[in-house]
Protein backbone atom coordinates (compact mmCIF):
# COMPACT_ATOMS: atom_id res chain seq x y z
CA UNK A 1 0.00 0.00 0.00
CA UNK A 2 1.26 3.42 -0.92
CA UNK A 3 -0.18 4.99 2.24
CA UNK A 4 2.25 3.13 4.50
CA UNK A 5 4.93 1.93 2.08
CA UNK A 6 5.92 5.20 0.40
CA UNK A 7 8.02 7.95 1.91
CA UNK A 8 6.48 11.42 2.21
CA UNK A 9 8.81 12.67 -0.52
CA UNK A 10 7.64 9.92 -2.89
CA UNK A 11 3.99 10.66 -2.10
CA UNK A 12 4.48 14.39 -2.84
CA UNK A 13 6.41 13.73 -6.05
CA UNK A 14 3.97 11.12 -7.37
CA UNK A 15 0.97 13.26 -6.41
CA UNK A 16 2.41 16.31 -8.14
CA UNK A 17 3.62 14.52 -11.27
CA UNK A 18 1.11 11.67 -11.69
CA UNK A 19 -1.83 12.48 -9.37
CA UNK A 20 -1.12 9.22 -7.55
CA UNK A 21 -0.47 8.92 -3.84
CA UNK A 22 -2.19 12.17 -2.96
CA UNK A 23 -3.37 12.45 0.60
CA UNK A 24 -6.49 14.39 1.45
CA UNK A 25 -6.50 16.29 4.69
CA UNK A 26 -9.24 18.17 6.39
CA UNK A 27 -6.94 20.47 8.31
CA UNK A 28 -6.49 24.07 7.30
CA UNK A 29 -3.54 25.02 5.18
CA UNK A 30 -0.72 27.04 6.67
CA UNK A 31 -0.60 29.16 3.50
CA UNK A 32 -2.84 29.93 0.54
CA UNK A 33 -0.59 28.94 -2.35
CA UNK A 34 -2.88 30.51 -4.95
CA UNK A 35 -2.75 33.94 -3.33
CA UNK A 36 0.02 35.95 -4.96
CA UNK A 37 1.29 33.00 -6.99
CA UNK A 38 1.81 35.17 -10.08
CA UNK A 39 4.44 37.18 -8.15
CA UNK A 40 5.71 34.57 -5.67
CA UNK A 41 9.39 35.35 -6.18
CA UNK A 42 8.94 38.94 -5.12
CA UNK A 43 6.14 38.65 -2.58
CA UNK A 44 6.33 35.33 -0.71
CA UNK A 45 8.30 34.66 2.43
CA UNK A 46 10.80 31.79 2.43
CA UNK A 47 8.47 29.88 4.75
CA UNK A 48 5.53 30.22 2.37
CA UNK A 49 7.65 29.23 -0.62
CA UNK A 50 8.99 26.13 1.18
CA UNK A 51 5.53 25.12 2.43
CA UNK A 52 3.85 25.58 -0.95
CA UNK A 53 6.62 23.67 -2.70
CA UNK A 54 6.50 20.73 -0.31
CA UNK A 55 2.71 20.58 0.04
CA UNK A 56 1.43 21.72 -3.37
CA UNK A 57 4.44 21.60 -5.69
CA UNK A 58 4.31 25.37 -6.31
CA UNK A 59 7.23 27.81 -6.37
CA UNK A 60 9.82 25.04 -6.07
CA UNK A 61 12.43 26.69 -8.29
CA UNK A 62 14.70 29.33 -6.78
CA UNK A 63 13.58 31.80 -9.46
CA UNK A 64 10.43 32.52 -11.45
CA UNK A 65 11.82 32.78 -14.97
CA UNK A 66 8.60 34.28 -16.36
CA UNK A 67 8.40 37.10 -13.81
CA UNK A 68 9.60 40.37 -15.34
CA UNK A 69 11.02 38.52 -18.36
CA UNK A 70 10.48 41.53 -20.63
CA UNK A 71 12.79 43.66 -18.47
CA UNK A 72 15.22 40.91 -17.45
CA UNK A 73 18.24 42.84 -18.67
CA UNK A 74 17.71 45.50 -15.99
CA UNK A 75 15.70 43.76 -13.27
CA UNK A 76 17.23 40.27 -12.96
CA UNK A 77 20.35 39.44 -10.98
CA UNK A 78 23.21 37.73 -12.80
CA UNK A 79 22.57 34.53 -10.83
CA UNK A 80 18.91 34.55 -11.92
CA UNK A 81 19.89 35.09 -15.57
CA UNK A 82 22.33 32.17 -15.46
CA UNK A 83 19.93 29.87 -13.61
CA UNK A 84 17.03 30.61 -15.97
CA UNK A 85 19.25 30.11 -19.00
CA UNK A 86 20.74 26.83 -17.76
CA UNK A 87 17.59 25.35 -16.21
CA UNK A 88 14.70 26.79 -18.23
CA UNK A 89 16.42 27.89 -21.47
CA UNK A 90 15.19 31.44 -20.97
CA UNK A 91 17.37 34.50 -21.44
CA UNK A 92 20.08 32.53 -23.27
CA UNK A 93 22.12 34.09 -26.04
CA UNK A 94 24.29 31.17 -27.06
CA UNK A 95 24.15 27.44 -27.46
CA UNK A 96 26.79 27.14 -24.73
CA UNK A 97 24.21 28.17 -22.13
CA UNK A 98 25.71 31.59 -21.50
CA UNK A 99 23.31 34.23 -20.23
CA UNK A 100 22.76 37.33 -22.36
CA UNK A 101 24.79 40.44 -21.82
CA UNK A 102 22.68 43.58 -21.45
CA UNK A 103 24.57 45.27 -24.32
CA UNK A 104 26.14 44.10 -27.56
CA UNK A 105 29.32 46.18 -27.82
Image (tube, rainbow, N blue to C red):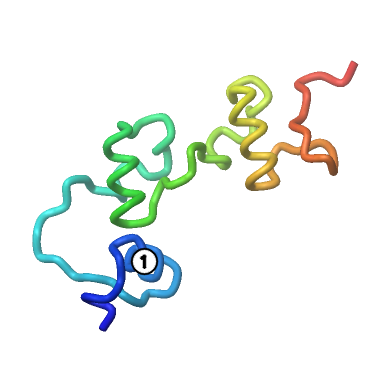
Side of 59 where 73 appears, left or right? right
Looking at the picture, does residue 42 appear above or below residue 48? above
Q: Residues within 10 Å of mark 1 (few under 14, many from 20)?
A: some
Side of 103 where 18 appears, left or right? left
Residue sitting at x 48%, y 38%:
62
Q: Position of residue 65 (x, y in %)?
A: 57, 40
Q: Nearer the viewer, residue 103 or 58?
A: 58
**Which residue ends up furthest to the top in the rendered image?**
105
The quadrant holding residue 8 is bottom left
**Which residue ends up furthest to the bottom in the rendered image?**
1
Residue sitting at x 39%, y 51%:
58
**Which residue ends up furthest to the right in the rendered image?**
105
Q: Nearer the viewer, residue 87 or 42?
A: 87
Judged from the image, the secondary structure of the residue bearing numbered disc 1 is helix
Q: Position of residue 28 (x, y in %)?
A: 11, 55
Residue sitting at x 43%, y 74%:
18
Side of 5 where 75 appears, left or right? right
Looking at the picture, does residue 74 appear above or below residue 50? above
Q: Position of residue 83 (x, y in %)?
A: 62, 36
**Which residue ends up furthest to the front in the rendered image?**
5
Q: What residue would you read off at disc 1?
A: 10
Q: Nearer the viewer, residue 27 or 71?
A: 27
Side of 40 where 101 appears, left or right? right
The quadrant holding residue 36 is top left
Residue sitting at x 21%, y 75%:
4
Question: In which quadrant is the C terminus drawn?
Answer: top right
Amino acid sequence: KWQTGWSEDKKRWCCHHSSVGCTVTTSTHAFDCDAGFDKWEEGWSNQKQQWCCSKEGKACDPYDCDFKLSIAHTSWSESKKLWCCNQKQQWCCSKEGKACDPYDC
